[in-house]
Every structure is written in structure tokens, then in C-alpha cells.
Image (tube, coloured by chain):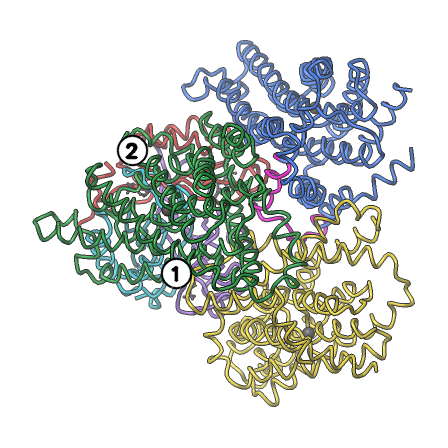
Chain colours: A yellow, B purple, C red, D cyan, E blue, F green
């Protein structure tokens, strides 16, 4: 375990993330230019999809069926568990709880990538359809959490809450009433979704032969680009450290314990669904991760009463680094333990 | 040079609202708008999206009634929940008939 | 604080015109200008260049006569053919003598 | 729509001054600011930083006293040495109480 | 033929273009950041020039002479045929016809690249000086078309047209009278021209030895970068689909038939000039292609009366995808047929 | 010597720089997009640090000690010699002299890289800790020169100069009094410093094994990216050519002779400190180079009276191209001569 942890700590990915955090802490103005950040994320998502598609074209439907079911199940369970814990134990408002639950019910592609790199570095074989599972896990959690938020807050509204507490969706105003439908469209057509799903399709159709000439670009450069991306993620996470106080102890604990629980559940379900040790590790990392690309704008638009400081700080400054540093190795141990 | 006195409404808001605000601008009766990227800080210290600090600046040149409609809509529907600022400036526009 | 009342001329136009418009601004008598990127839509729904939506926003602070010269030139030479908007705003400028 | 008359102070300056000018804006009493990228040319024809032409545009909506404090500070501390322009515009702001 | 077509359809280039179109059709907000698009095009043009220069340094002047003559000939013929067809058959105004002719008389570098990749994938050897031909074909067509537009519209003007119909060039106004000269300078010093010609020179001087250390960057990454570029081109083309109605049936037909005619002419001339099957294919793709980087700003500035919807839609949403999907394989068949 | 010079002239790096200058001279609008320039410089600095760190992890402290001492010595000497020459012989004002001295006392990372590529191309082995020396040389010169400027101008002030001649630091105003402290923090936390030092640390911790998977990105792409970067540097230098007249003959001479003197001194000290021929060449290029990334903003903020045209033109349009074309080969000859 310690060996695995040390190896993980000394990878360029983790170190670059740490460098980014450190740069913020010493108040450096270092930051990746906006378009470079966007370019890197476009590249990473498309490359991830592309490779996933090429590998998917070699998988049988039978092999994917149960893992896909299990993944969708996780997409339905994790937002609910998150919401309940945040409301009951954390005493968060319905909006805040739903906003956070949307993040924890969805998935962080970079956590997926870190888990993939981690497993590969340890020589664990990975199922070729894992990127497909990633796309399945991205949106259901967001919609379930937002729906819960809408319903709960409307109940609260009927029970006498002021207008400010009710989500826009429920106030029957022209532009807001379309909230959920709009969000559904937006999440499904979001940049990240199109790049991932589109990459999968392109990869699946073009296959090994078509992939060969673009492989040096999309595969050879991948880890280096990911390293630079993690530098920027460290910078962004570092700039949120100051918000940890505002987030409070409960949220810090939630951002660490909830991923462990979701990770454990995913390892169990993944094992039951027939995934390998590496596959279980990656699935657990997905379930344990909190979205910070797809979820924030969706939540901001649909549940504007939810405090963004909570969900941005929790996913970026707590759960992401936790998973990167300790979570992924932990899920790996769990997966090995359950498999053997 | 013959010019028409009109109002310019400027809105600086969280970037996530861009498309919605453009809809509001057009449905208030504007014939066009200009949008550009901005950063900023204000009373709410909060921003959304994947990168912090992201704002959008929208400007539209309209007559007084459209300005009023737009500002009212912003004040009631957006100000309570979103980080934003909105104000009008008096301008004199070339070929102003176009924008009324 | 002692300030000078001057006019700010703002032009938002297709990006392809940038260099030409800067020439027009300077030859109307301006001592400087500020330029920034913008997007927008208006009555013409047309843009050029390799990417759609590309506009440029040019602002120059000038006295009334220069503003008039510039606006007249824009109205006669550019408005008929190009997507653009132009307007003046009254401003009070620090060390305004510089810009007259 | 009930609006409050306030002043918008616009400063366009060398990008290297960005952080310092934001400090000046806030210490003059502003509750917020909006910043965006700009290019430009003026009497000094000089710019710094690794790339030429880099300017920053800062805008803040304040009351008259804060505007005066800010402009005075700019005029005495920055104008002698740096490439910049500063001016005020009268605006009418939604929920203007916030910014006073 | 079907095999070639299918192979072409399944290449990552074509599929990425299709993905971009699809993303627009389902109204996704996906788009490459502006600077990333610019960076990719700078990279592609410079890499193309560089490699072309290295190969050029190994070509003899004798080998290039006739192909160059043939290319310049095409640069003079294609704008004229386009103009005549658009005026006579299409009843377009002189400005609109000249504007479109400037686009079809010039060349699209990405179409060139797609044809190059296509021929290489089929194992066809290509002449090293093809990128040189590309630079020869870029500007003459634009100038000829703009000159025709100016002359024709001035005639129309004298025949009593209103001021709005006359091109600025002819109205004797200070700033516009310089129109053509300005445009000549602009086209010759345009970003794409400098990068291509500059790359050619750098490559020719530095040669194989100098190229070796930068080859992984400029050659290894080329196809991958081109794939991402085509994704963005698909997005831009997709956003023009709505303008097809405005363009009308004649223009749609023109955007398909004209390239076939120009392509056939180029195959014949190229064969006569001594080009290989691959070389003929690429030359045909060039002649058949319509510029959408160099021509639009030049036309917009010189012939502002020409409706940009026509030329942008025709080159981007009709001719480019036609060439990419069907045109290039067709020119290849023609080249094989004439060669054999 | 001529062979080395010719080889240097024909490298893609030098030629790309020349292309950039030429593009400006013929007034092309070609320029790399801002974010692409920033992205390239982030990549280059981080990659340089990373590789340096990996190599550093294999160097002994003993091997680095004297070279480090020698480097710091150069960092203290070069700003002083520059200042004295500019004041005494050039009759520059204290502020202008100090501003220029800050640039010549610091170092240009791209000159370092060009020297490194030059030596590698000639097969000269290089010490692994050279990037470490680069970071040591970056900041001392800036601070020494700015301190000299502050002190000298304050003296001038007391001797009756007008307020305009005195540096802000000395006028006791709230915001300016913090000048030097602010600048120290800024230089140490500047983008370039964090990327270099951070890269060194990441590389040193991760070592060969961690570096392996990101090597294709950070090492394979390095020279190509540097080529594009030099294209932009050529464009920027070319746009400063017009300012050469304003700079005057003295400054042109200074921008050539001072680097030669500093280079010679560095060769001597480097040889004495135990560096190889390649190491001496690179150290000389560093000492001879003038900063144009770290120094300009620091000088602009602390010594606003110093005319930026002087220091930007001297470092970018005179000293950088001189070093690139002739300086580096010259220092190499010196190093060979002193070694043999
Ligand atoms: N006083 C102000 N002057 C100029 N812009 C402001 C001001 N206050 C807020 N803003 C802008 O409006 C955005 C939202 O402000 P707020 O809703 O106060 O958090 C900020 O990010 C700024 O861009
Ligand atoms: N009413 C308006 N308010 C603000 N900007 C406008 C307005 N109308 C047009 N514009 C700007 O001017 C450009 C050209 O407009 P047009 O010539 O009307 O197509 C648009 O792309 C917008 O950036
Ligand atoms: N007359 C003007 N109108 C608009 N912006 C100006 C004007 N003069 C100067 N500027 C802006 O202020 C910056 C500094 O000007 P200066 O201090 O005159 O060199 C320029 O780069 C422009 O962005
Ligand atoms: Na999750
Ligand atoms: Na053509
Ligand atoms: Na130096």
C-alpha cells in the first residue's frame, strides 16, 4: 500500500497538481491562459473518447451489458445518497444539498484519467469500454439531483418559504419554467459530452487502421498534456483553499468520506458486474469523483439559490485532491481485496 | 452629423447567463447587441463555470421603453440570484432610426 | 479633480475593417484610440473573416468637431456596406487638453 | 424602473498596472470593478510586458466623491509616468444603492 | 471506387468534420477557442510549408517547370469560368459573381491536405513540390476575380446603375480607390501566405538535417492536429447549413458541379504537365477547392456589395464537404483513368 | 568557425526568427495569437525545468557547487558593469541605465535554449544542472540593478532634481514605497520562475521513471515548439527595428559589445568553476543575454521613468539576435580555446 501511495505521490500528474496549488499559495500570478486551458480539455476529452472508441469497436455487447447497468445504477444512487446525507446530517438547505448532490452524482473526467493512468502504471489491464461507462455516468446524476432540488424546494415553497428560497423552476416564470428541459439539452450537448461521445463514435467507426496515423498526437502526447492540465487544476484548487473555512468541517468531511463510500459501493457493484481489478478501480474513482465541468453551470442556472462556494470548493479543493492522492490507491486496494 | 439620442444598456454578469440574457435583450425589443469577455469582482465574490472570474459584458442600444423593459426584467428575474450589474448611458447614435 | 468634457466615439464593426477604421479615427484628428474584441449581432446578421461573429470595438476620445468628422465619414463611407454601429457618449476626461 | 445616477470611471492603462489600479479603485471606495483586455495607441506610443500593445480597461461604478478620489490619485500618481487615459461617464444604475 | 469512398468516409478527418457538423445541428455550444483555431492553422500551414521546403530542396527546377505553368494557368482559368457561369447561368450580380469567383479561383489549404493524406493513405507517391504549387495557386485567382468585379461593376455604373451597385473601388473615394493595391499587398502578406512561403524557404534552406530534430513536432503531430482542425471546420460549416436556403439551388449545384469541372481540367492539365496519379489528384483537389481563409476578407474589403452569405456558404458548406467526401476520390479515379 | 556559423544560420531556429523579422519588415499582419504565445512559453519553461530536474537528480552537490557560485557571481557583476558603462560612457540617466542594467543582469531563457540546442547539435555533452544555473541567474541582476537605480536617483533627487526624475520608490508615496519589496515578490513568483523552479522540483522528485511517459510530449515536441516560439520572437523583434534609430548608435554598440565581454567573463569563470566546453558556452550565452520576460514588467513598475524603448529594443532587437546568430558560436570558440 505504501509503495503504491508513494508511487502515486511521485507521479508527474500529482506533482504538477501540487505545484499548481503551491503557486497559488505563494500568490504567484501563474495561470494557464484561458484558451490553452480550453484547448487542453478539448484535446484530452476527444483523445479519451477516440481511444475509447477504437477499443470499444473490439468489445462485445455482452461484455459491456452488466458494467453499463451497474454504472447507470451508480448514477442513480450516488446523487440520492449525497442529497440525503447533506440534508439530514449536514442540515444544508434543499438547494445547497441538491447542488452538491448534482456534483457528486456526476463524474470528473480528470479523476477518471488519473485512475486510468494509475492502473496502467501498475500494469493492471483495463476494459476497453471504460470511457463508454464514463459517458453513461456523466448526466443522470445531475438530472436526478436537480429534479430532487426542484421538488423539495417547491414543497418548502408551499410550506411558506419566501420567494428567494424557491428555485426559479417553481416560480412559474416564463424563462425559468423551461429550466430542467433546457438543462437536459445543455448537459447532453455540452462540450465535454459531445467530445467524449463524438470521440467514441469516431474511434469506433475508424477503428485501429484509421487511428494509427493520429495516434502519435492523440496517444503519444496524452500524458504530457494531462500533466499541464493538472497544473492548472492545482492553481484553480489552490485559489479555492481560502473558501474551505466558509465550507466548514462538515463539508470537508463529506468531501472525503462520501467518495470512500461511493468508491466502495462501486467496487462491489463493479466486481459483481464482472469488471477486472483495474476496471473496478476506475469505476470506483468515477463514482467517488465530483464533476466540476458539467455540473457547475447546470446547477448555477437551475438552482441559483445554491451557494456556488459550497459545490465548487467541495469538488475542486476537497474531493478531487483527495481522490488523486489517496482515493484512487484506496479503491485499488479495495478492488484487489474483493477480487482476491 | 445627424444623430439620434438613445440609451445604451450595459449588463455585466456571470458568463453562464450569456445566452439567456441575449434572449432577454431581444425580447425586450432590441434590434441587436454587442458582447465581450470581462472579468470582475463585486459584492457577491462569486462566479461559476469551470474557470473563476468569467463574466460577460452585453451592451444594447435601445429606446427608453425597451431599456425600461429590459432593466425591469433584469431587476426582478436575475438580480436576486446572480452576480451582475446593469446600467444605462445616454448616447447619440448614427442612423439611430435603425435601432428603435 | 479638474476634468474636460469631451466626446467618446464608439464604433463596433466587422473585424476586417479594423485597420481602416483606425486610419479613419486618426485622420479625423484623434490623438489615440482603444480597441478590443467583441462579438455581436444586428440587422445584417453578417460577418466576414474565417470565423463568424468577429467584431472589433474601437473607442476614441475626441472633441466635438473630430467626432463629427469621424461620424460623417463612417456614415457615408462605411454604413452602406458594412455591419457596424457608431455612437457618441459625453465623458469628462482627466488631463483632457491632451486629446483635443 | 427606478435607477440611481452614478459615475462610471473608465481607466485604460498598461496591463502591467492592472493589480495596482484595482487596489486604487477599491481603496477609493468602490464596491467592485470590471476588467477587460484592450489594445490601443496614444501619445506615448509605449507599452510594456512581453508583448506590445497590451492594455487593460478597468471600469468602476461609484459615487461622485469616490470618482474624484480615484481620478485625483490617478492624475498625481500614475499619469506622469504611465501610458493611460481616464474618464467619467454619467450612468443610471439598477439597484444603485449597492454601489454607493 | 466504393472501397476508396468507404475508406475515405471512415478516416478520422472526414468523421471529425462530420462530428463538427452534427454538433452544430444538435445546437451544441461546442467550438474550438479562437486562439486554438488560429494556433492549429498556423501550425498546419507552417508545417506544410516546412515539409514542402525540405522536399523542394531535392527537386530539380526542370521537374517543377511544367507543373508550375499548369498551376498558374489553372489560377487564371478557374476564376474566369466561375465568373462567367455565375453571371450567365446563375444571373448573379457582377459583385456577387466576382466575389464567388475569387473564392473558386483561389485554393483551400485544408482540401489540399485532405487530398495529400488521401493519396498517401492509398500508397500513391507524391511529388515533393506540391506545396509549392499550392502557394502559386493561392493569389492569382483572387486578383483576377476582383479585377473583373471592379471593371464589370464600373461598366454597370456607367450604364446607369445606382451607387450602391458600384464597387467602392470605382467610386473614386479616398480610402477605397486604393482597394486593389491594398488587397494585393494584403493577400501576399497574409498570415497563410507568409507561413506557407516562409515555411517553404525555411525548409529548403535547412534541408533534411535541420528538419530532423523538429520532425516529431511538425510531422508526427500533423494528422492529429488536422483532425482537430476539421472538427472546427465542421462546426463552422454546420453553422452555415441554415444559409443553404438563402443560397438557393443554383449555388448548391454550382458548388458541386464547378469543382468537378475544374478538377477534371486540372487532371488533364496535370497529366499533360507530367504529374503522377497522386500529383494529379492533389492538383485537381486544389483547382476544385474554394478558398475560405484568404479570399473572404479580401473580397469583403474590395467588393463590400457582394453578399458574404453566398461565398461563405458556397465554399464552406457546399464545396468543402463535397470535395472532402466525394470530390477527392473522384479526381483520383479520373487521374488513374487518364494515367492508365 | 565558418562551418559552425553556417550550421547555426541554417538551423530552423535561426531561420524561423529571420522569417518573423522578415514578416514584420514587409508589414505582414502575421503574429501568433496571444494565448498561443503564452502557451508555448509555459510549455517551454516547464519542459526545460522538468528535464533539468530529472538530470539534476543525477548530479552530485559537489559538481554543482562551484558552477553555482560562479553563476551567482555573474549575476552580481553583470548588472554593475552594465550600469557603469551606460552611465559613464553612454551618459544615460540613472533610471535608464538601471533599467537597462536590470535586463542585462538577468537572463533570457530562449537564448539559453538556443545555446543548449547549438551545443547539442555539435555533439558537446552538457552538464545536467545547467537549467538550475539558469534559475539562479534570473533574479539577482534585476534586484541589484533596481536597487542601484533607486539609490542613485534618490541621490540625484537630494541634489535637486525635479520630482519627475526621481524614482517612485524614493518619493515616499504609499503605493510606490513598497516598490522594491513588491518587485522581489513578483520576480520570485513570476510565471517563468515558478515554471522553471517548479519544473525542476517536479522533475527531480519524479526522476527518470516518472519522466518516461511524459517524455514524448515534453522532450519530443521541444524543438518544434521552440521553432514556433522563435517565429514570434522574430515578429516582435522586427516590430522594434523601427525603434533602433531612437535607441541610437551607442545602445546598438552596447547591445553587441557588452554581451561579448560578459560572455568572455563567463567562459573564463565557467572554465575555472569546472564546466565543460558545452557548459561554458551555455553559461556564456546566459551571462551575455538580456532578459525580456522577467525584467520588463519589473523595471516598468519600479522605475517608470526609465524609457521602455531603450530596454525593450536593446534586449529584443539587438542583443537577442546578435547572440542567436553570432554570439553563441563565438562563446563556443572561446570555450574551446580556453579548454584546449
Ligand atoms: N461597482 C462596480 N463597478 C463596476 N463593475 C461592477 C461593480 N460591482 C460589480 N461589478 C461587476 O458586476 C459583477 C457582479 O457583481 P456583484 O453582483 O456585485 O457580485 C462583478 O464581477 C463585476 O464585473
Ligand atoms: N442595437 C444594438 N445595440 C448594440 N450593438 C449593436 C446593435 N445593433 C448592432 N450592434 C452591433 O453592431 C454590429 C453590426 O450591426 P448591423 O450593422 O446592424 O448588422 C453587430 O454585430 C453588433 O455588434
Ligand atoms: N484619444 C484617445 N481615445 C481613446 N483611447 C485613448 C486615447 N488616447 C489614449 N488612449 C488609450 O490610452 C492608452 C495610453 O495612451 P497614452 O498615455 O496617450 O500613450 C492608449 O494605448 C489607448 O488605449
Ligand atoms: Na460521482
Ligand atoms: Na480553386
Ligand atoms: Na545577462
Between discs 1 and 2, the one toward the N terminus: 1
Q: Residue A181's quadrant in the figure?
A: bottom right
Task: Tell me, yes or no, whether the two marked residues, 1 and 2, touch with CB atoms within 8 Å.
Answer: no
In space, the residues marked 1 and 2 are separated at their CA atoms by 30 Å
Mark sitting on residue F247: 2
Q: Residue E209, relative to residue D66: is it above or below? A: above
Tell me residue A285's x, y (percent): 70, 73
Residue behind mark 1: F188
Q: Is residue C91 visible?
A: no
Could you tell me which residue is drawn at 38 percent across and 37 percent down? Answer: F319
Q: Chain of mark 2?
A: F
Tell me residue F288's x, y (percent): 38, 43
Question: Which sits in the foreground, A111 or B46?
Answer: A111
Q: Chain of mark 1?
A: F
Could you tell me which residue is drawn at 27 percent across and 59 percent down? Answer: F180
User: Helix, strand or loop at disc 1?
Assistant: helix
- Relative placement, left or right, of D71 versus D48 is left
- Relative placement, left or right, of A84 versus F112 is right
Q: Which residues are magenta?
A: E24-46
Label 1 CA crowd tier, 10 Å (few <14, some 14–19, many 20+): some
Q: Is mark 1 within 8 Å of ligand 6?
A: no
Q: Residue furthest front?
A: F340
Q: Is mark 2 within 8 Å of ligand 6?
A: no
Question: Which sits in the foreground, B27 or C51?
Answer: C51
- Relative placement, left or right, of C66 versus A5 is left
Amino acid at each position: 500500500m505504501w509503495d503504491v501511495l508513494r508511487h502515486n505521490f511521485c507521479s508527474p500528474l500529482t506533482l504538477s497538481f501540487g505545484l499548481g496549488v503551491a503557486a497559488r499559495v505563494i500568490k504567484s500570478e501563474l495561470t494557464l491562459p484561458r484558451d490553452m486551458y480550453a484547448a487542453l480539455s478539448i484535446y484530452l476529452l476527444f483523445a479519451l473518447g477516440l481511444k475509447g472508441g477504437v477499443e470499444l469497436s473490439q468489445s462485445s455487447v455482452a461484455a459491456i451489458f452488466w458494467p453499463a447497468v451497474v454504472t447507470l445504477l451508480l448514477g442513480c444512487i450516488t446523487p440520492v445518497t449525497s442529497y440525503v446525507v447533506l440534508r439530514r446530517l449536514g442540515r444544508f438547505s434543499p438547494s445547497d444539498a441538491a447542488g452538491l448532490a448534482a456534483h457528486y452524482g456526476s463524474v470528473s473526467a480528470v479523476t477518471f484519467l488519473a485512475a486510468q493512468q494509475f492502473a496502467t502504471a501498475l500494469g493492471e489491464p483495463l476494459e476497453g469500454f471504460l470511457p463508454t461507462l464514463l459517458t453513461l455516468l456523466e448526466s443522470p446524476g445531475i438530472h436526478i439531483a436537480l429534479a430532487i432540488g426542484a421538488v423539495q424546494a417547491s414543497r418548502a415553497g408551499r410550506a411558506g418559504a419566501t420567494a428567494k428560497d424557491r428555485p426559479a423552476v417553481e416560480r412559474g416564470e416564463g424563462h425559468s419554467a423551461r429550466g430542467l428541459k433546457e438543462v437536459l439539452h445543455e448537459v447532453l450537448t455540452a462540450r465535454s459530452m459531445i467530445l467524449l461521445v463524438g470521440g467514441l463514435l469516431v474511434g469506433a467507426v475508424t477503428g485501429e487502421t484509421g487511428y494509427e496515423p493520429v495516434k502519435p498526437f492523440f496517444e503519444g502526447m496524452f500524458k504530457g498534456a494531462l500533466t499541464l492540465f493538472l497544473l492548472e487544476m492545482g492553481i484553480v484548487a489552490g485559489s479555492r483553499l481560502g473558501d474551505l473555512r466558509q465550507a466548514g468541517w462538515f463539508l470537508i468531511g463529506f468531501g472525503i468520506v462520501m467518495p470512500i463510500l461511493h468508491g466502495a459501493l462501486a467496487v462491489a457493484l463493479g466486481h459483481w458486474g464482472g469488471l477486472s481489478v483495474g476496471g473496478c478501480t476506475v469505476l470506483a474513482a468515477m463514482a467517488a469523483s465530483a464533476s466540476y465541468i458539467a455540473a457547475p453551470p447546470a446547477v448555477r442556472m437551475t438552482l441559483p439559490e445554491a451557494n456556488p462556494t459550497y459545490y465548487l470548493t467541495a469538488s475542486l479543493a476537497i474531493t478531487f485532491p483527495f481522490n488523486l492522492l489517496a482515493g484512487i490507491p484506496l479503491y485499488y486496494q479495495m478492488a484487489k481485496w474483493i477480487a482476491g | 452629423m445627424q444623430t439620434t439620442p438613445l440609451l445604451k444598456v450595459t449588463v455585466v454578469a456571470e458568463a453562464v447567463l450569456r445566452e439567456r440574457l441575449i434572449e432577454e435583450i431581444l425580447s425586450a425589443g432590441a434590434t441587436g447587441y454587442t458582447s465581450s469577455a470581462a472579468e470582475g469582482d463585486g459584492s457577491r465574490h462569486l462566479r461559476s463555470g469551470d474557470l473563476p472570474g468569467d463574466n460577460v459584458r452585453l451592451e444594447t442600444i435601445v429606446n427608453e421603453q425597451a431599456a425600461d423593459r429590459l432593466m425591469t426584467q433584469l431587476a426582478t428575474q436575475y438580480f436576486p440570484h446572480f452576480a451582475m450589474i446593469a446600467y444605462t448611458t445616454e448616447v447619440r447614435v448614427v442612423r439611430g432610426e435603425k435601432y428603435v
